[in-house]
Structure formats: C-alpha cells, structure tokens
Amino acid sequence: MAMDEDESLHRFSLHPTGADLDEVRGLLAAQTRLEKGAQGDGDTELMKLCCVQLFNAAVLEDVLLIWKAKSASMDADSSIDIQLLCGSGLARTKAFLSNQRLPEAEAALQRLLRCEAGGDFEDFSVAGHAAWYAAYYAP
C-alpha cells in the first residue's frame, strides 16, 4: 500500500528516530525517483513532509537526500524549502557541503549561498523553523 502524507505523519510523527528514520529516507528516495522520472508521478507533499522529518533529525548525511528531492522537479523545488537542508544549522550545512566532492553537493552549496545572499535565511533558526512546521502540520 502506498503511503500518503497523513499516514506518514501518523506513523512517524515529525520527529522519527531509529529504524523509522531509515523508512522515511527510503520513502523519500522512492518518491524522488518517481518525481524525477516524470513531474507529478511523485507525491511532493509527502516528499516535503519527509524532508521536514529529516530536518528535525538533523543528520548532516541527509542533506544530499533532501537536495535530491528538492531538485527532482519544478514542483518539488517549489514544495521543499531550501531551509530544510539546514536541520544541523546553516553554517554546519555549508561546511558539510563544502567538504563533499560531489557535483550535487556543489550545486546545493551554490543554491544555499545564493539564497542566503538573497535574504532567505534572514532570522533563520533551526528551532524557529521546526516550530513553524510543527504548527503547519498540527491537526
């Protein structure tokens, strides 16, 4: 059975841990593949929720998974906020991406830098962003 946004939120909450985090990663990767194959084939709302869940887990290694989801299509790019790459904080995320020797890490870093210069991270805090999403997804 395919999982939707409501089911994922009910099953994993906004703060999954342990094996649930691995399931969220798998779900995001599967939806990203669908969306990259053809815009609209993936569930971008579910993708966004998975990215919020990974943002809240604050595992730096998830940054590129979130970036791949964001860059899967124009719809995904619009749905998934750039700030969701920064669950470990903007400075730590930029440092992590700078140390990766991958084209997608460079692309993500350049986008972060452009967005930061454009004011998208004005008043950004991990706690503030997490609280905003907690209110957004509140029943």
Image (cartoon, rainbow, N blue to C red):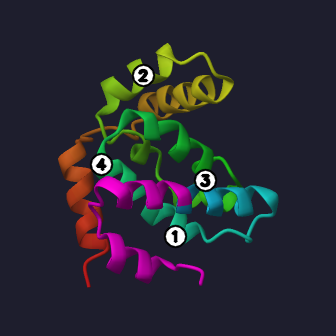
x then y, percent, for residue 117: 44, 27
Q: Are marks 1 and 3 in contact (CB under 8 Å)?
A: no
Q: Is residue 103 above or below residue 73?
A: above
| Mark 1, secondary structure of its residue | helix
> Which residue corresponds to mark 1?
46
Residue span colored magenta: 1-26
Three-letter amino acid code of the residue under disc 2: Phe
Left or right: where 105 falls relative to 128 = right
Residue 57: numbered disc: 4
**What is the spatial separation of the Cα atoms under label 1 and label 3, in whole angstroms?**
13 Å
> Which residue corresponds to mark 2?
96
Disc 4 residue crowd, few under 14, some 14–19, many 20+, Cα 10 Å: some
Q: Is residue 90 in the magenta section?
A: no
Q: Is residue 36 visible?
A: yes
In the rendered structure, which disc, 1 or 2, sits on the residue that comes first in sequence? 1
Q: Are marks 3 and 2 in contact (CB under 8 Å)?
A: no
